[in-house]
Amino acid sequence: MSAESLQERWEVEAGGAVYGASYSELPEWIGEGSLLPGDKVRRGNLRWIEAGKVPFLIPFFNAKAEGLPMPVISPASSPEPLQNIISSGETGMIEVNTFSSPHIRSEQASPEPAEKRNSKDPGVCSIHGDRETFYLCGSCDTPFCKACPKSYGGSVKICPDCGSLCKPLGEMQDSRSVDLQRAAALTEGFGIGDFLNAMAHPFKFKISLFFGALMFMFFTLGQSVSALGGILMFSSAIFCVMLANMLTFGILANTVDNFSQGRVESNFMPEFEDFSIWEDVLHPFVLSIGVYISSFGPFILVMIIGMYFVLSSLGAQKEIFQNEIEKIPGTEYYTPDRTLQQSEEVKKLIGNVSEQNEKRLDAQDEIAAGSPSASAIDENADDAKFVERSIQESRKAQLEAAVGKPSETQYHQLASILKLAAPLAVLGMITFLWGLFYFPAACAVAGYTKSFRETLNPMVGLDTIKRLGFIYVKLLAMGLTILIASVIIGTILNAVLMPFDLPGMGNLPTKAIGSLFGFYFSIVFSCLIGYALFKASDRLELYK
């Protein structure tokens, strides 16, 4: 066998990986147990076959199996064949030609020196100096043209020197640029510069910003059609809510995923080329529900419980009031079947009224007999007023005796409500602060996991907060700044555009303009979360 044949490059597929080796190295691999008969090998671009079926390698596998010394070959020896008997499934015995020699090279064949292969310039092929570099080895950084690397499967390129994977030059440069950018970002840390970059990032993609804001504005206005009434309008409003969440949380997931991998210059708008109702509409909506439940869910639960207790207390007070007022004659709630239970005051009042009626009848008789005196007329008028006043005061006294004076009643009702509201107010404040504190972490988890279950799990969010450390404190401060700016802008818009407020529909111009600012602030907030995760990617282990 010639020396050129011994140095010919072979490829070995073992353990799911492809390795390069010279022909003379394969027997050494067999002796070490690295190459098995069932592993695939091939020479050049020929088809893959099992190593145990290569005639040159069969004696080495036999010697390995029998525990004998490895046969050796030498390029200087003549190719005298040795007859080796190998068992076959069909004939029982076959003859295999091999070569005997007292020596085999133990050292690996090293590639030619770089000086002899025109590899000084990384822009040209290390083997063909007149061709531009197209591939770059991931291990030895050797540049190659399109024809030099070995092909595997049509798309996998193998370095002819070290057997590692080769990648296109542009892809390798982009990958290394991201690595350098990531290293610089980890050294720089998260701060005001990232906040300013997040504010400016949406304007780098003006078309996406314009059409995204326009869609978000229409979806926001569409949520007001429920005021028109009808199941169709209500369904349309719900669908507009889902579409608005499709944009905001779709942008959040896309931005967090790109930024956490170092692609901080990528477009914030997700691609809708392969539109899917689940992936592009329902999934972001479900993620948004998970974010709000995990952050503000306890606050909403406390508010529901508080409203239940307050309404129950008011209902009990109303029932007591109604039971008492039903016992008072002269009211619309009084029941006639309780006349036998009238109080002595009511009986006395009825007696007084009867006496006054008798006096009126006597006065009328006097008028019929002749003109009465002025004093008699005045006396009758005074008596009538006295009777009416007595009736009103009696009813008022009995009403106050039953339910208390108005001020006292209101005080007792307010005191009972406050007695319930005090612990609920404390719990409400705590849970509301929890929502503000945990909301960025919930958004981050929803962005990089895209899992509803992980988003609901507070342990995942708390672990993220722990790994972010002081970066999360800065993120909270920046998020609070955005929230305050949004509230100020909304207040100004409501004050300026107050004349356009419509019953039921609300202030449509304020909603339209406010939605534009809201969309922009949502992008900025998503970028802030992405920058924070990128700057802590070494601790979060998100970098792929």
Image (spheres, grey):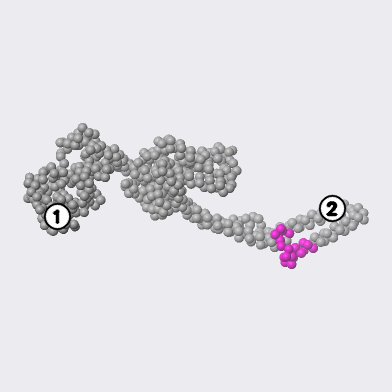
Which is closer to the viewer, label 2 or label 1?
Answer: 1
Would you say residue 260 is visible in this rendering? yes
Q: Residues within 10 Å of mark 1 (few under 14, many from 20)?
A: few
State the predominant SS element of the stretch in magenta: helix
Mark sitting earlier along the chain (2/1): 1
Asked if 217 appears above or below 539 in the picture, the reply is above
The residue sitting at the top extreme is 130
Identify which residue is drawn at 48% across, 44% down.
244
Q: Amino acid at mark 2?
A: Asp
Q: Which residue matches tag 1? A: 94
Asked whether residue 196 appears in the rendered view, the answer is no
Residue depicted at x 68% and y 60%: 325
| 242 on left or right of 59 | right
Position of residue 55 measured from the top left corner of the image (x, y, whole percent): 15, 50
Indicate whether residue 346 is drawn in magenta.
Answer: yes
Residue nearest the observer in this picture, 79 or 109? 79
Q: Secondary structure at mark 1?
A: strand
Q: Where's residue 506, x and y in %?
A: 57, 42
As helix, strand or loop, the secondary structure at mark 2 comes to helix
Q: Position of residue 513 (x, y in %)?
A: 51, 38
Q: Is residue 169 left or right of residue 296?
A: left
Could you tell me which residue is drawn at 20 percent across and 43 percent down? 44
Count of labels in the image: 2
Q: Is residue 338 above or below residue 189?
A: below
Q: Are marks 2 and 1 in contact (CB under 8 Å)?
A: no
> Rounded to the nearest whole Å, what is the CA distance between mark 2 and mark 1?
148 Å
Please state the extent of the stretch shown in magenta in the rendering: 330-351
Q: Nearer the viewer, residue 152 or 428?
A: 152
Q: Is residue 365 magenta?
A: no
Among the 4 quarters of the image, the one containing residue 388: bottom right
Residue 378, disc: 2
- Out of 317 and 262, give the one closest to the viewer: 262
